[in-house]
Image (cartoon, coloured by chain):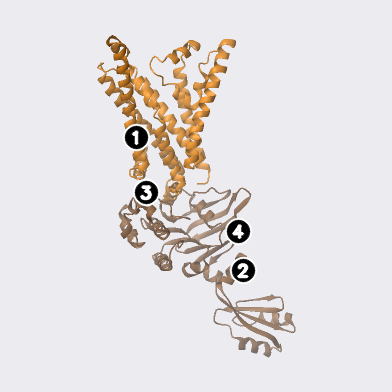
Chain colours: A orange, B brown
Amino acid sequence: MQTASYMQKLLQIEWLKLKNHRPFIIIASFFTLGVFTINYVVYILNNTINKVQGAALIKSSNPYDFYYTWQTTSYWTGWLLLLPSLLIIILVTNEFTYRTNRQNIIDGWSRSQFIEVKMMLALIVAVCSTLLVVLSATLFGLLSGSSFSTHGISHVFFFFLKALSYNVIAVFISVWIRLTGFAIGSFFIYIGAENFISILLNNNLSLKLRNDYNIDLGSLGDYLPMNASDGLLTFPDNPLKTIAKSALPTDYTWLVACFAVAYLVLFFWLSKRNYLKKDL
Amino acid sequence: MEILNIKNLSKNYGTVQALKQVSFSVPAGTVFGILGPNGSGKTTLLGIVMDVLKPTSGTYEIFGQSPTADQRKQIGTLLETPNFYHYLNAVENLKISAAIKGRGVDDIDRVLEVVDLAKRKNSKFSTYSLGMKQRLAIGAALLGNPDVLVFDEPTNGLDPVGIAEIRELIKKLSKEGKTIIMASHLLDEVEKVCTHVAILKQGTLITYGDVNEILINEDVVETSAADLEQLYQLLQRMPGKLSINRKDQVVQVNFSSGTADLAAVNRFCFDAGITITHLQLKKKSLETKFLELTH
């Protein structure tokens, strides 16, 4: 109870900073609009394609039918998660640019409180993103004419994990790099580099281990920090996924999810350690 | 009671030693000036005390205890530059400071009046001039009427009227019994408002104590005679002198400002059988004293 009140106080102060911050309002609005727009576009396209293919197929293959809607909405919204991550980078690095983080400490926050509130912000942004997914999935699921079902809602949890991972990595990079432009650049370079390493691991090591040594560890690229949460979100009946499954048949979903959580803890710890030890 | 007690504080930036084993304490109720030229380590010292910089070695105590974040809430601080959210106005910025301090929300209008920003309280911080930003930072430090204030170069960016106002404000706060720690490179500023002073030079503490003992204005009587050693021994007994020293071919006798009497010195020497060949009154300015200490 005391911890909740303590966190509430910190977040109220964070809200004082945010409520009139134009980039926050713009990016949050774009993201909210984007979640519904991207799913609406996919929903309409899918309906159009199905109508062309024949009315008989519509019911059986609509990706927004319950229970597919959780997975479909999570998957497509996942593409927009760069927006909240960029917002987090801007918010955290601005504190360094304008040295307001120093003032917060001078005024009486501890260094731990500062980094904890930024991590809480990352969490809240992830929760809000997830709520938008729930809302959007429910809306388009009902629009598709199917009956409500929570079956398959675990994909929304995977979305939450991905959103949180992106946001926490954004905080981590911001705390270490401190300059907005460099931090955003580093974030994109990191995404590219991790995807490249992931492809190398999957195409070479994962298959080699399985074929030559009969060791199946799944797709090794999925164990990297961002891919751990990325890999959890797939489009329903994705043919690429089917091919990957045939090459590496073992389902390591929950192991990968555990890795994603472990990375969250690691990035939180590294961010906090950096902020506690360095000059501000 | 000591408000701040610094023990052997050192800070290195790579190979540069910004602070070298600095130790001193700040008594309660004083206006304590930390004086030194640019780069002498004043801001580094206060930055460490405010936990925005980490010391390489050494410790410090605030209110006689190991430092904590809660102690900083009891201290109003302006450190180096005014740091505010540029997209927020004065009131919104002060609300954040007050919320972090856990006090002072009701005090916002008062402090804005004190620093003469009431008319611009709804303007964004980014539209403020340097002087206005500095005033807002001083206003933020005053929030909640803290008993201890830390001002790092408080008159930076202010015009002459603003400088005079801030000096008067500091004197007024001092009369109210507040402890003020003020870093400055301006000797004049320290001399005018401080009761105590610590002088830093390239990270080393040169001296510290009562400002009247360290930065005293002195009259210097320069004398010379055929037998310099005999003159030096005699002037040791000169009534009213503060100190005496030999320098090249002269003996310098220091008196409190306005008390040196050349005729009395001449008579004192003549009565003792020493003929003075050189006698000159020099005023030792504070600047000279400061330069002597820091160069």
How packed mark 1 is, by other alpha carbons closer than 10 Å (few <14, some 14-19, many 20 or more), is some
- Residue B219 picture location, percent across and down: 58, 79
In the rendered structure, which disc, 3 or 4, sits on the residue that comes first in sequence? 3
Residue B226 lies in what quarter of the image? bottom right
Judged by depth in the image, the label closer to the viewer, 3 or 2, is: 3
Front-most of residues A205 and B235: A205
Give, as a three-letter code, the residue at label 1: Phe
Q: Is residue B33 above or below residue A49?
A: below
The residue indicated by pointer 1 is A30
Amino acid type, label 3: Tyr
Above or below for B260 versus A18: below
Of B266 and A245, nearer the camera is: A245
**Residue placed under numbered mark 2 in the picture:** B292
Q: How would you rate the neighbour count of disc 2 (Cα within 10 Å): few for under 14, some for 14-19, many for 20 or more?
A: few
Residue B202, numbered label: 4
Distance in Å between CA atoms under marks 3 and 4: 37 Å
- Judging by the rendered image, the residue that carries numbered circle 3 is B87
Image quadrant occupied by the C terminus of chain B = bottom right
Q: Quadrant of residue B178?
A: bottom left
Q: Is label 1 on the same chain as label 4?
A: no
Q: Are marks 3 and 2 on the same chain?
A: yes
| Residue type for callout 2 | Glu
Horizontal and vertical percent position of residue A114: 43, 42
Q: Residue A259: in sight, yes or no?
A: yes
Q: Quadrant of residue A135?
A: top left
Q: Disc 3 versus disc 1: distance between alpha carbons?
A: 20 Å
